[in-house]
Image (cartoon, rainbow, N blue to C red):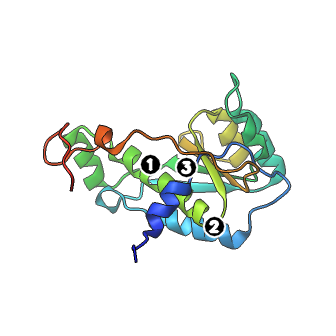
Amino acid sequence: MEKTNPLLELARSRQSDRAYDAARPVEAEKLERILEAARLAPSACNAQPWHFTVVTDPQITHRMGRAAASLGMNKFAKDAPVHILITEESANFTSFLGSKIKDKYFPLIDIGIAAAHITLAAEAEGLGSCILGWFDEKAFKALAGIPEGKRILLDIVVGYPTKPKRKKSRKEARKVVSFNKYGEWEEP
């Protein structure tokens, strides 16, 4: 019998959903589990350089959806019953120092990892999600009471999708994976 990998199955089924049932709220216990997965995400030097602002008030989420839609982008966001805003917070000294020495800004990597945890946890709960980077940050700050000096890096919309799963299109493994030397493929 072939062993299944639950994380691999989540990765295969997870997609960026762009249609949500606006009338169906997400249960609090599901949100709690999703946020716990985000809180447990790894980060460089355990800096945890994030804050998650969860917006569930239908009037505010609708206004956020409108603030995310411009130039034809993200029109679906107005129907998402949940917006999880990820705000960048200060990294600890060792992460900050490592970022300077290695010329890699670790907080951005860390926030990306936390976002992946959120989307996979949402999938595990039977919910859809989509990571948005295109939105009116000033409007979001006003709507969610986020201080002017903070930076909202991502908005992850979450809800019950209204469209079926799409066929996932990905490059074949040998085009994106190498073993032992860049660009060389060999069976593992």
Quadrant of res 70? top right
Answer yes or no: is residue 64 visible. Answer: no
Classify residue 69 by image quadrant: top right
**Callout 1–callout 2 Cβ contact below 8 Å:** no
Q: How far across and how far down the image is residue 16, in percent? A: 60, 45
Q: Residue at x 45, y 50 (%)?
A: 111
Label 2 crowd bin: few (<14), some (14–19), many (20+), radius 10 Å: some
Q: Which residue is mark 2?
A: 125
Residue type (three-letter) at the residue carrying disc 3: Ile
Binning the other alpha carbons within 10 Å of mark 3 as few (below 14), some (14 to 19) or many (20 upward) gives many
| Residue appearing at x 55%, y 43% in the figure | 154
| Label 1 crowd (10 A; few <14 / some 14-19 / many >=20) | some
Q: Tell me the quarter of the image containing the N terminus.
A: bottom left
The kind of secondary structure element at disc 3 is strand
Q: Between residues 130 and 112, which one lies in front from this camera angle?
A: 130
Q: Do residues under tags 2 and 3 come within 8 Å of each other at their CB atoms?
A: no
For mark 2, give the secondary structure.
loop
Give the residue at the far front of this rendering: 1
Q: Quadrant of the C terminus?
A: bottom left
- The outermost residue toward the left is 180
Toward the viewer: 17 or 93? 17
Q: Is residue 153 above or below residue 82?
A: above
List x then y, in percent, for residue 30: 66, 69
Label 3, label 1: how many angstroms apart (C-alpha)? 10 Å
Residue type, label 2: Glu
Question: Earlier along the polypeptide chain: callout 3 or callout 1?
Answer: 3
Would you name the residue on which mark 1 appears?
112
Residue 123, percent across and down? 59, 60
> Disc 1 marks which amino acid?
Gly
Q: Which residue is mark 3?
A: 86
